Image (cartoon, grey):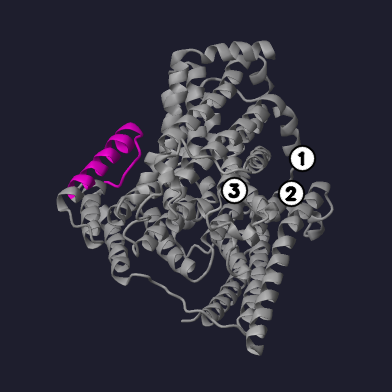
């Protein structure tokens, strides 16, 4: 194995391979930073380009796009509250408030470093313990997937800064929206109002772009600029220090991202939300989350980049892609005649290990690019909103149209945008709605299949060891938040009673 | 509208939505039993949380006012611009429609430097054409006149 790794690392010294990784990383960052254009789309578009290339060069290019794209999503998430990728949705919770405080450069630096370490941790896991981790994922059945979705939804209780019940209702609304279209078991169309475009369900990207991008530009209409003046930390970024105490959060996020990434279907978005939630749970200052706490940015970014290596574990060892980008990457492997499985690590070991090692280089490249370019990225926040709003709207149209070449999706994006703006004003959580939309298909499939297996008995969700472990994790997520909410209410009631006495 | 009445409205809307979903799921055919079970599960949970929100709204506390729109004029200009932009896409095509939308909305939102507005819009659309259309081959709406 070590001789193969050594041989693979020699291939990476080829200037053309290095140039491929760099080009892929830069392209990935740009694509990731533009709302609606995802790394999946970029990888899928580039697969035909890699057909004529040397396998190592082609796969290194795709790996660079994947890593860069995952990081790039944080840029627009932090600066515009418009996640470039769904995985960067949780980054906006603290990243955007930091931008509004004039600390966009700091937030970007934290995101860059956290993404780098998250990526490094997960690539090490991919390199060293891939077959072992893959065997754990194989033990997940429908009940475990349903509970995994419930665990993701449980994180809503800590994502919600206002009324907890409204947060949970928002998550449920997301689940209901995800139920539009044909059901995943019998293919029966529901809640479509006879609109054929809705038979395959509400397209996720237009909904996401609408909720996070269009609703945000409508919010921006009230201000002339996102920030009037950037704080000095942006131009003096290289001299400014990273906030202390982030290493634990970043390490935890990297491991969470790796583990969640290994589970097929779970994905970087769920990992980022879980990591964010965990960081808030263990924080001594949980109320600062959502108001511009760099720990929140570090937690979500380390986890979503942690998914890059994790999602490749089942892909390379079992041929099961961990998420949509990994599925697209599978096409890149197949086009080179590389069939996922044990042979990838033996017969084609040099190519496989070179691909894995190229991910380390991609992480180093985006670390340098991210830290060097952060001040320039941050300047976007000073562009007048009268210029920024039409520009984002045009990119949102491209992003929502490009997936299905459908103007219906553009109307859908607009409906979600305007509706999302008013839901946000009404105190409902757009983040929770998006989480419900993401988890809906996983929850429904797991729920339906589990009850078919158990012949309708709900005890299937309680009598399996992994299910019990997930229930314990759910309780650990929910109970402290409920306790905190109860104590806050008690304090408010006591305060009101005190005022009445006075 | 204050937050108390808003929460009551949301709770009642949630109960109505749950009821409509449950009613609809009852008419699902036998083969879609799993789908019906899931919809009933969602409807029951929706009802539960909506009832809790409704009960919460009767708790004694000072309600706050809900501010729907912070600056009405630019908000309406942006919404109107977006609502005109999408039909315009299917008539003029992406690039002419985007040029009209970006310059008109930029102007309506208060950008005064017309020269910069036209140049900036042209530059942005040129960048989109080179990177997205030519290099990445991302499809854009063509419209009736093929723009």
Q: Are marks 2 and 1 in contact (CB under 8 Å)?
A: yes
Residue A289 placement: quadrant: bottom right
Q: Residues within 10 Å of mark 2 (few under 14, many from 20)?
A: many
Judged from the image, the secondary structure of the residue bearing numbered disc 2 is helix
Q: CA distance from mark 3 to mark 2?
A: 29 Å
Asked whether A105 falls inside the magenta stretch, the response is no
Q: Earlier in the sequence, mark 1 or mark 3?
A: 1
Above or below, A20 against B105 in this view is above
Above or below, A489 against A103 in this view is below
Residue at the outermost bottom position? A501
Percent across and percent down for residue A410 are: 37, 54
Mark 3 sits on what residue? A295
Quadrant where the C terminus of chain A sits is bottom right
Quadrant where the N terminus of chain A sits is top right
| Residue A449 placement, left or right of A211 | right
Q: CA distance from mark 2 to mark 1?
A: 9 Å
Above or below, A180 against A8 in this view is below
Please identify, in this view, whether the residue under mark 3 or under mark 2 is nearer the observer.
3
Mark 2 sits on what residue? A144
Chain ID of residue with mark 3 = A
Percent across and percent down for residue A362 are: 51, 27
User: Residue drawn at (67%, 10%), measured in percent from left and top?
Assistant: A3
Asked whether B136 falls inside the magenta stretch, the response is yes
Judged from the image, the secondary structure of the residue bearing numbered disc 3 is helix
Is label 1 on the same chain as label 3? Answer: yes
User: Residue drawn at (32%, 66%), measured in percent from left and top?
Assistant: B75
Q: CA distance from mark 1 to mark 3?
A: 33 Å
Please report the bounds of the magenta region as a residue range: B118-142
Residue A120 placement: quadrant: top right
Q: Which residue occupies the foreground of this view, B49 or A102?
A: A102
């Amino acid at each position: 194995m070590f001789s193969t790794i050594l041989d693979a690392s020699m291939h990476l010294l080829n200037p053309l391979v290095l140039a491929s990784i760099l080009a892929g990383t830069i392209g990935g960052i740009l694509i990731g930073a533009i709302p609606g254009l995802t790394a999946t789309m970029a990888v899928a578009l580039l697969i035909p380009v890699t057909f004529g290339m040397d396998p190592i060069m082609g796969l290194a290019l795709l790996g660079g796009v994947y890593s860069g794209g995952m990081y790039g999503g944080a840029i627009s998430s932090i600066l515009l509250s418009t996640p470039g990728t769904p995985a960067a949705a949780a980054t906006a919770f603290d990243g955007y408030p930091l931008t509004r405080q004039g600390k966009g450069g700091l937030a970007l630096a934290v995101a860059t470093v956290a993404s780098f370490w998250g990526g490094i941790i997960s690539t090490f896991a991919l390199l060293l313990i891939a077959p072992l981790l893959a065997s754990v994922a194989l033990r997940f059945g429908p009940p475990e997937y349903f509970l995994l979705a419930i665990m993701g939804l449980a994180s809503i209780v800590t994502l919600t800064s206002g009324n907890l019940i409204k947060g949970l209702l928002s998550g449920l609304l997301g689940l209901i929206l995800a139920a539009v279209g044909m059901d995943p078991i019998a293919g029966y169309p529901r809640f479509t109002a006879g609109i054929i475009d809705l038979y395959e369900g509400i397209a996720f990207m237009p909904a996401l772009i609408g909720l996070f991008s269009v609703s945000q530009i409508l919010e921006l209409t009230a201000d002339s600029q996102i920030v009037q003046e950037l704080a000095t930390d942006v131009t003096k970024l290289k001299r400014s220090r990273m906030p202390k105490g982030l290493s634990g959060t970043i390490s935890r996020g990297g491991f969470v991202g790796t583990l969640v990434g290994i589970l097929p279907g779970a994905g970087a978005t769920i990992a980022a939300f879980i990591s964010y939630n965990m960081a808030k749970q263990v924080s001594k200052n949980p109320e600062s989350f959502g108001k511009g706490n760099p720990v929140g940015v570090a937690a979500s970014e380390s986890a979503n980049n942690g998914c890059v290596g994790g999602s490749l574990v089942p892909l390379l060892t079992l041929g099961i892609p961990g998420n949509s980008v990994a599925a697209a990457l599978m096409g890149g492997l197949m086009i080179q005649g590389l069939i996922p499985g044990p042979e990838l690590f033996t017969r084609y070991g040099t190519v496989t290990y070179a691909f894995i090692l190229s991910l380390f280089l991609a992480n180093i490249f985006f670390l340098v690019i991210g830290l060097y370019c952060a001040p320039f990225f941050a300047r976007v926040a000073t562009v007048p909103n009268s210029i920024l709003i039409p520009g984002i709207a045009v990119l949102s149209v491209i992003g929502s149209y490009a997936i299905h070449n459908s103007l219906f999706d553009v109307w859908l994006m607009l409906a979600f945008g305007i509706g999302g703006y008013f839901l946000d004003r009404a105190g409902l959580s757009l983040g929770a709605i998006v989480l419900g939309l993401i988890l809906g298909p996983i929850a429904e499939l797991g729920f339906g299949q589990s009850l078919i297996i158990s012949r309708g008995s709900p005890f299937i969700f309680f009598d399996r060891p992994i299910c019990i472990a997930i229930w314990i994790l759910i309780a650990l997520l929910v109970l402290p938040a409920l306790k905190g909410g109860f104590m806050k209410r008690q304090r408010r009631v006591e305060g009101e009673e005190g005022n009445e006495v006075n | 509208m204050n937050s108390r009445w808003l929460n009551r409205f949301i709770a009642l809307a949630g109960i109505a939505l749950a009821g409509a979903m449950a009613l609809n799921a009852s008419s699902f055919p036998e083969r879609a039993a799993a789908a019906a079970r899931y919809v009933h599960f969602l409807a029951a949970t929706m009802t539960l949380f909506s009832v809790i929100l409704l009960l919460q709204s009767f708790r004694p506390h000072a309600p706050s006012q809900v501010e729907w729109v912070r600056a009405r004029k630019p908000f309406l200009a942006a919404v109107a611009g977006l609502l005109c932009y999408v039909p315009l896409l299917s008539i003029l095509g992406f690039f002419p429609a985007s040029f009209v939308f970006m310059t008109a909305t930029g102007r309506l939102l208060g950008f005064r430097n017309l020269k910069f507005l036209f140049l900036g819009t042209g530059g942005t659309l040129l960048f989109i054409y080179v990177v997205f259309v030519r290099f990445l081959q991302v499809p854009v709406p063509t419209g009736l006149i093929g723009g």
